[in-house]
Image: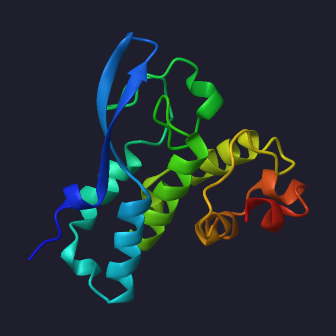
């Protein structure tokens, strides 16, 4: 028995300023993350096709202006490293994606250094964010920061406080 990915992923639409058209997108969201946490807690993650789900989530990380299978991004350098969908909140997308990848054991499938740089850039190195991070635990972001010692994180003395 397999847990269908359609029950874990959120479907939505995104507007591409590059192509001036709408795109259907599939992302991990708060509901899917809650489901993954529940499956992990009852020791049933083997019911999920991890390889396919990790590939879907990892494909959303912005490393260029034309990510394969994703809407083109106009100012992609502003969100480089983050998990970004045009017209969706970048830090929220990033949080859900990192948390899900951590649960699934897929953090090695993304560019962690670029992700950390993207988070620091959005926080302007001081803990400021243009949008609030969702009111959920942010242990995943702290775990990523600990796993990958990053020079930018070393410059931020209170990184644990401002990321959490």
Residue at 56% of width from left, 25% of height from top? 76
* Left or right relative to 95: residue 44: left
- Compared across the picture, whether 103 is left or right of 163 comes to left
Residue 32 is situated, as x and y percent measured from the top left of the image, at 35, 62
| Residue 13: % across, % down | 34, 31
Relative vertical location of residue 130 with respect to residue 75 in this rendering, above or below:
below
Camera-nearest residue between 129 and 107: 129
Q: Residue at x 21, y 66 (%)?
A: 49
- Give the image quarter of residue 38: bottom left
Q: Quadrant of the C terminus?
A: bottom right
Residue drawn 91% across and 62% down? 157
Task: Check the picture and name the quadrant holding the N terminus.
Answer: bottom left
Residue with the most extreme left position: 1
Count of marks overlaid on the render: 0
In the rendering, at what x and y percent does residue 85 appear?
A: 46, 35
Left or right of 63 on screen, residue 43: left
Residue at 87 percent across and 56 percent down: it is 156
Colour theme:
rainbow
In the picture as drawn, the residue positioned furthest to the bottom comes out as 42
Check the image and report above or below for 3 versus 43: above
Check the image and report above or below for 40 versus 142: below
Is residue 109 or residue 60 the one in the foreground? Answer: 60
In percent of width and height, residue 148 lies at: 65, 63
């Amino acid at each position: 028995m397999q847990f269908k990915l359609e029950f874990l992923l959120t479907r939505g639409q995104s507007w591409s300023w590059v192509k001036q058209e709408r795109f259907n997108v599939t992302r991990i969201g708060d509901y899917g993350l809650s489901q993954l946490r529940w499956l992990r807690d009852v020791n049933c993650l083997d019911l999920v096709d991890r390889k396919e789900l990790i590939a879907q989530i990892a494909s959303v990380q912005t490393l260029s202006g034309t990510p394969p299978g994703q809407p083109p991004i106009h100012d992609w350098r502003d969100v480089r490293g983050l998990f970004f969908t045009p017209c969706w909140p970048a830090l929220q997308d990033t949080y859900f994606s990192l948390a899900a990848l951590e649960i699934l054991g897929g953090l090695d499938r993304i560019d962690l250094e670029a992700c950390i740089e993207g988070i620091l850039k959005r926080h302007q190195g001081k803990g400021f964010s243009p949008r609030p991070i969702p009111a959920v635990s942010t242990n995943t972001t702290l775990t990523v920061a600990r796993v990958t010692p990053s020079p930018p994180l070393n410059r931020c003395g209170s990184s644990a406080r401002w990321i959490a």
